[in-house]
Amino acid sequence: MLYAKAGWKLVVNRGTGQWGTDYDATKDLGRVPLTARTLAEPEGSLTIYLVPDAAQPTTGYADLRGVLRIKWGSTELSTGWRIDQ
């Protein structure tokens, strides 16, 4: 995740083993804007949820979609997701 004046972004990167100053932006697959909100109850540890819209998809993988929620401290970041065939 990356914070800037314009807001939070989720950075998807194909590199592994990167840490801090070893980050290689040329391996970025994409950046997704995140919506931020303040939590009423702080989250004690970094928690990531993939919340589907429906418990049972009706047409297989084509209709799998939902919300990605990332919680830590008093902040929740979220964005929609879907599986495209």
Image (cartoon, rainbow, N blue to C red):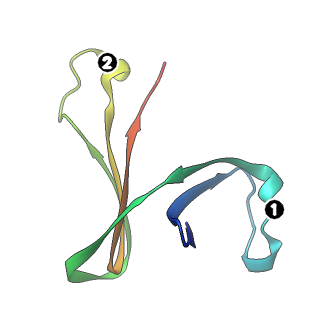
Question: Residue at image x 81%, y 62%?
Answer: 24
Q: Nearer the viewer, mark 2 or mark 1?
A: 1
In the shown orientation, is residue 56 left or right of residue 78? left
Residue 28, given in percent of the width and then of the height, sits at 72, 51
Q: Which residue is mark 1?
A: 24
For marks 2 and 1, give the CA distance: 36 Å
The image shows residue 50 at horizontal and vertical percentages of: 34, 50
Where on the picture, by quarter, is residue 15? bottom right
Q: Is residue 68 above or below residue 23?
A: above
In terms of secondary structure, where does tag 2 sit? Answer: helix
Q: How many marks?
A: 2
Q: Residue at x 54, y 72 (%)?
A: 5
Quarter that holds the N terminus: bottom right
Q: Is residue 15 left or right of residue 79?
A: right
Q: Amino acid at mark 2?
A: Gly
Q: Residue at horizontal 75%, vertical 66%?
A: 17
Counting from the top left corner in percent of width and height, residue 85 is at 49, 18
Q: Is residue 20 above or below residue 77?
A: below
Say left or right for 69 vs 19.
Answer: left
CB-based contact (under 8 Å), mark 2 and mark 1: no
The image shows residue 23 at horizontal and vertical percentages of 77, 68
Residue at the spot x=40%, y=40% of the render?
81
Q: Is residue 27 above or below residue 76?
A: above
* N-term-proximal mark, 2 vs 1: 1
Disc 1 marks a residue whose amino acid type is: Asp
Helix, strand or loop at label 1? It is loop
* Residue 60: mark: 2
Q: Is disc 2 surrounded by few (<14), some (14 to 19) or many (20+) residues within 10 Å?
A: few
Q: Nearer the viewer, residue 80 or 63?
A: 80
Question: In the shown orientation, is residue 28 left or right of residue 60?
Answer: right
Q: Residues within 10 Å of mark 1 (few under 14, many from 20)?
A: some
